[in-house]
Image: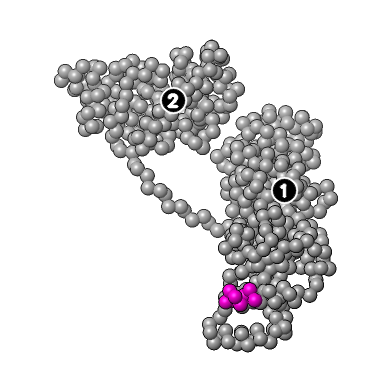
Amino acid sequence: MRVIVVATLFLAAPSQAADPLSAELKACRSYCKAQDKAMLGLKTAKFDGTYARACVCKPLPPKPVRQKAEAAEAMAPAAAADMMRAAPRAMGRHDEAPVDEGFAVGSIDCDSEAVRACLSRPTRYRAPVGDLPAKLPPSGEFDVTIIEVSDFECPFCARAQETLRQLKTGRFADRIRFVYAHNPLGFHRRAMPAAIAAEAARQQGQFWAMQELLFSDTKRLSDDDFRRYAEQIGLDMVAFERAILDPGTRARVQAQVKRFNAIGARGTPMFYINGRVLKGAQPLAAFEKEIRFAIGDAQRVRQRMGINDSEMVYRQLIARGKTTAEEPKPAAAPARKKVPEFVPIEAQADPIRGLGRWPAPVVMVAFSDYECPFCARAHKTVRALRKKYGDQLYVIHRHLPLSFHKRAKPAARAAEAAGRQGKFWEMSDLLYANQRALSDEDLLGYARKLRLNTTKFLADMKSEEVTTAITEDVSKAGEVSVRGTPNFFINGVHVAGAQPQPHFEGIIDEQLKKAKAAKKSGVPADKLYQHLIELGGS
């Protein structure tokens, strides 16, 4: 059934809302008839002291049935009363838009933004609070429950904390209960230990204090950091250490993971606002929009069912929510241009990022990202290959900082800046060895460790020259259809990923044979690379 809404908004006392609605009924009947639809009736909704009366119509049945309907219409007001009694059943299957500053006085039809928003609201899940840590308004009463499902090592979860802080002090603060559930992701090595530390603090009534400290720096999650935070918030350290080692503490975290994974929380952060899902570190406006809907939902439950207890209202709201999430449908992968097996890639002596002696019979061009763990693994292989082949192998590094690695680009800038003081590869060694420590402070520390001129280092990091160098590398990667890291071109022969060292050696040995044959035929050393590239990998 399609709902047509005509809403007249006005401030009224409860007694006014109960006044006879003969004028409104007449207007509603006329409106539905003009739209060639049958009237279901009027509905009054309350939202923060404002009443909205909605005229609800439905499509007319086929003509034979319509004639009976028109006859019934002529029998008003008795027929109208019958329709009024039927209206709540029919309209109960639809959510209503809350009355707020987004509404204007006048008519709202099915194509309005407000009605479209109602009909496209997120899925509601049965998300019980149970024994999860909760923070209530001072009054203890609430209309909205926000369950945050989060991971202490997730940078997006940390970013969302500022939005949640604004909600805790904003215009809806006295109507929201905040709840936290753990979902440490498997590829975040310190997320589970951090969740256990938070649970250990919770046993001493200090969950929220520990939670705030853990989110203050997602890269400071060592055991020593946990102990420092525990001392900072005044925990009994013996009890804290005992709780961390207790298998039951980990089991509580795992139980939360299982519970919320079942209703779709597979990534972080995920929020359930009165059971309805909001994914990711959304802006404040996105939260407030759903909160306004959620308050309206709670108000209707209170009014219709005569329930005042906040917890009972929440349970009623989620009672019909889904208990399992639908498996996500695999998205059709966009057609990607495959990297050819051989690419006549340009290469020449690089005074900053070149490793070895130019010219060399074999040239390796490597596209890499300092925050990529596979690149770190491949970097060790490159170092081993250089040790084995010496000046027969010349390596050129090219930057490809991936967008989802937030510290990859600053790290690339640091390597470039160090390269301008002759320490590109030494800095690269440090960056790959310390991928979890790439803050601005860490990068400056590596510069000091390499005895660089730190004033020049910092200036070079911000320079246009360094920016251009990185941008050009990214552009070159695109030209050869390289989108991920690491990728290598050995005399133009493509190698994708952190392959085992023997795989590289087989290609290098083959290229050395070709170079030797070319030299015998009279190709000079400084023309070898160009000659082998022109052979096209054959």
Given residues 238 and 338, the one toward you in this image is 338
Residue at 22% of width from left, 24% of height from top?
Answer: 531
Q: What percent of the width, then of the height, locates residue 497?
A: 40, 35
Question: How far is mark 1 from mark 2, CA to CA?
Answer: 46 Å
Quadrant of the drawing holding the N terminus: bottom right
Above or below 313: residue 278: above
Q: Is residue 35 magenta?
A: yes
Above or below 405: residue 285: below
Given residues 86 and 108, the one toward you in this image is 108
Residue at 19% of width from left, 22% of height from top?
Answer: 518
Q: What amino acid type should be assigned to the residue bearing mark 2?
A: Thr
Q: Quadrant of residue 521?
A: top left
Does residue 294 appear in this view? Answer: no
Quadrant of the drawing holding the C terminus: top left
Of pointers 1 and 2, the one earlier in the residue sequence: 1
Does residue 535 appear in this view? Answer: yes
Where does label 1 land, which residue? 179
Where does label 2 land, which residue? 468
Q: Quadrant of residue 422?
A: top left
Q: What amino acid type should be assigned to the residue bearing mark 1?
A: Val
User: Is residue 251 toward the left or the right of residue 209 in the image?
Assistant: left
Q: Is residue 180 magenta?
A: no
The span picked out in magenta is: 30-37
